[in-house]
Image (cartoon, rainbow, N blue to C red):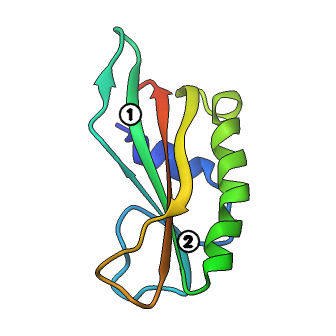
C-alpha cells in the first residue's frame, strides 16, 4: 500500500531532501511531509490533510522553496493516477519549531483527494 505521504513525496520535485521525519543529522534545508488520518469519502476515494514543512537555515530559502512545491502539488491530479484532486488550505506561513534554533520552519497545508491501493 502506498500512503498519502508517499504520494506527495514522489510528486515534489526539489533539490532539497523530501522526508517524513526530521533527520537526526539535519541538512541545511529539507522538506518534511506529514498527514492526518485519511477520511473515506466514497468507496474508492479518501481525503487527507497534508502538512508540508520546509526547514532551512535561511528564511529566504524556506519561503522561496514553496514556489516549486505549490506548483508540484497543484500538478498532482494531472500527473499521478492515484490523485484526483488537491486543494491548498493554508500557507505558506512561519511555523517555528520549538525543538531547533538552527532552522526556520515554514508550513502549508492542503487536502489531497486520492485512492489508496
Q: Which mark is residue 84?
A: none
Classify mark 2: residues with Cα within 10 Å, few (<14), some (14-19) or many (20+): few
**For the residue labelled by badge 2, is the local secondary structure a helix, a strand or a loop?**
loop
The residue sitting at 66% across, 59% down in the picture is 66
Q: Residue 17 carries which label?
A: 2
The residue sitting at 52% across, 28% down in the picture is 82
Query: Quick check: can you spot residue 34?
Result: yes
Height in image: 70 above or below 106? Answer: above
The residue sitting at 47% across, 34% down in the picture is 111
* Image coordinates for residue 17, horizontal then vertical, percent: 55, 71
Height in image: 23 above or below 47? Answer: below
State how far apart marks 2 and 1 are (Cα): 22 Å
Q: Which of the pair 50/80 is nearer the observer?
A: 50
Query: Quick check: can you spot residue 116?
Result: no
In this rendering, would 113 be left or right of 66? left
Q: Which of the pair 70/97 is nearer the observer?
A: 97
Quadrant where the C terminus sits is: top left
* Image coordinates for residue 1, horizontal then vertical, percent: 34, 37
Mark toward the start of the polypeptide (2 vs 1)? 2
Amino acid at each position: 500500500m502506498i500512503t498519502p505521504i508517499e504520494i506527495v513525496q514522489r510528486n515534489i520535485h526539489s533539490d532539497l531532501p523530501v522526508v517524513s521525519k526530521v533527520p537526526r543529522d539535519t541538512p541545511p534545508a529539507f522538506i518534511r511531509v506529514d498527514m492526518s488520518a485519511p477520511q473515506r469519502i466514497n468507496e474508492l476515494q479518501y481525503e487527507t490533510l497534508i502538512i508540508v514543512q520546509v526547514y532551512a537555515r535561511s528564511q529566504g530559502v524556506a519561503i522561496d522553496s514553496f514556489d516549486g512545491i505549490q506548483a508540484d502539488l497543484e500538478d498532482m491530479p494531472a500527473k499521478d493516477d492515484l490523485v484526483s484532486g488537491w486543494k491548498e488550505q493554508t500557507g505558506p506561513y512561519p511555523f517555528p519549531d520549538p525543538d531547533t534554533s538552527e532552522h526556520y520552519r515554514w508550513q502549508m497545508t492542503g487536502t489531497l483527494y486520492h485512492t489508496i491501493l
